[in-house]
Image (tube, rainbow, N blue to C red):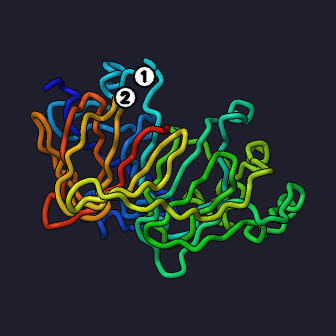
């Protein structure tokens, strides 16, 4: 077995933003989380939250270091040396509303001075009445939105969407959005940490000052012709093995997500020349292949390098589990 021929587990990197909660410890039985854990960066090649391998012979190595050593074995033959890992996978625990914000998109990121960021949210849990905001209502305009911000009424021009467990919301770069209180989310995004805040609910930061806003940068990043978003019902699930079904959630040029219901083992062929990641949404996962037998605990994410060949995935205990499979875009 070559060193990149097994599933990699990474030590979570926590962010203690003031709007966070405590669900990572309570729901997933994690130890060592901060008192407030807003985000858990599961797979990251970002210097502000770099993933470190915690299992197997590569324990202690960074994702960035592995890419520098052998990007093709990790990403696949199409990897561009030095380009980094294309995605950032994180969990978000929103005990309070996040700011009203926007990210640049591919066409305007350089002009905005940031990095493009298109993302999607898979709702892992939602309290009754939980909602998100995504995109403008039909009669919004640049002038009206600027006026609404001045009057602290930005929410009136944003589309509110009630959410529940299992929903998938797509947020392309340039779409104004906010995550509501009571949402636990798996977020998959372009590898970027550029966020422009438009409104932060008049919150005071840890330094006793209002958190910084980036209104003019945001206005340059917004897609003003962005269509009003709505939920698109996911495609039907397809049975792929006895007791195993796969339901496509989203397929974009940046990432693809599938919900996998595991009532037994599923043997998959080689990863088709690319990496994939598995998040254990319900129960734990057992991944077996030539020379490895790795358990991905409930609420954790494992990365299968492109060098991994045929493998099987099954519930690690009990008779059933549920996973979200993450792959690069199509």
- 50 to 12, vertically: above or below: above
Work out which residue is located at the far right of the displayed protein and give it. Answer: 143
The dot on residue 75 is: 2
Which element carries disc 2, helix, strand or loop?
A: helix
Quadrant of the rendered image containing residue 51 = top left
Work out which residue is located at the far bottom of the displayed protein and give it. Answer: 128
Name the residue at 74% across, 52% down: 226
Q: Position of residue 86 (x, y in %)?
A: 47, 34
Q: In the picture provided, is 49 more to the left or to the right than 293?
A: right
Q: In the picture provided, is 308 more to the left or to the right than 87?
A: left
Q: In the picture provided, is 295 more to the left or to the right than 324?
A: left
- The image quadrant where one finds the N terminus is top left
Name the residue at 35% across, 49% down: 325
Which element carries disc 1, helix, strand or loop?
A: loop
Tell me the crowding category of disc 1: few under 14, some 14 to 19, or many 20 or more residues within 10 angstroms, Cα based: few
Q: Position of residue 137 (x, y in %)?
A: 77, 66
Q: Position of residue 307 (x, y in %)?
A: 26, 28
Name the residue at 90% across, 57% down: 143
- Can residue 299 be seen here? no
- Can residue 221 be seen here? yes
CA gap between label 2 and label 1 equals 7 Å
- 116 to 13, vertically: above or below: above
Marks 2 and 1 in Cβ contact (< 8 Å): yes
The dot on residue 94 is: none
Front-most of 204 and 126?
126
Quadrant of the rendered image containing residue 132 = bottom right
Q: From the image, tell me which residue sits under label 1.
A: 78
């Amino acid at each position: 077995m070559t060193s990149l021929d097994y599933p990699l587990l990474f030590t979570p990197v926590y962010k203690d933003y003031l709007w966070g909660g405590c669900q990572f410890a309570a729901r997933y039985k994690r130890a060592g989380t901060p008192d407030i854990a807003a985000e858990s960066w599961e797979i990251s090649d970002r210097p502000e939250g770099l993933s470190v391998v915690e299992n197997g012979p590569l324990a202690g190595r960074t994702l960035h270091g592995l890419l520098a050593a052998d990007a093709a074995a990790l990403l696949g033959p199409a990897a561009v040396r030095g380009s980094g890992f294309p995605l950032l996978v994180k969990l978000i625990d929103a005990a309070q509303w996040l700011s009203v914000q926007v990210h640049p998109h591919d066409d305007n990121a350089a002009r905005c001075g940031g990095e493009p960021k298109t993302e999607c949210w898979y709702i892992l849990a939602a309290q009754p009445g939980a909602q998100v905001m995504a995109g403008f209502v039909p009669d919004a305009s640049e002038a009206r939105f600027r006026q609404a911000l001045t009057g602290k009424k930005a929410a009136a021009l944003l589309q509110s969407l009630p959410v529940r467990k299992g929903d998938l919301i797509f947020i392309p770069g340039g779409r104004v959005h906010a995550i509501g209180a009571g949402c636990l989310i798996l977020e998959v995004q372009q590898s970027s940490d550029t966020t422009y805040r438009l409104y932060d609910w008049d919150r005071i930061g840890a330094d006793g000052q209002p958190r910084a806003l980036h209104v003019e940068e945001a206005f340059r990043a917004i897609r003003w012709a962005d269509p009003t978003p709505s939920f698109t019902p996911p495609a039907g699930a397809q049975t792929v093995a006895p007791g195993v079904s796969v339901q496509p959630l989203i397929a974009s040029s940046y990432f693809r997500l599938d919900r996998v219901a595991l009532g037994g083992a599923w043997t998959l062929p080689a990863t088709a020349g690319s990496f994939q990641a598995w998040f254990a949404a319900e129960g734990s996962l057992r991944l077996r292949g030539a020379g490895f037998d790795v358990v991905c605990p409930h609420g954790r994410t494992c990365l299968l390098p492109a060098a991994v060949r045929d493998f099987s995935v099954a519930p690690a205990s009990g008779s059933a589990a549920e996973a979200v499979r993450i792959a690069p875009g199509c």
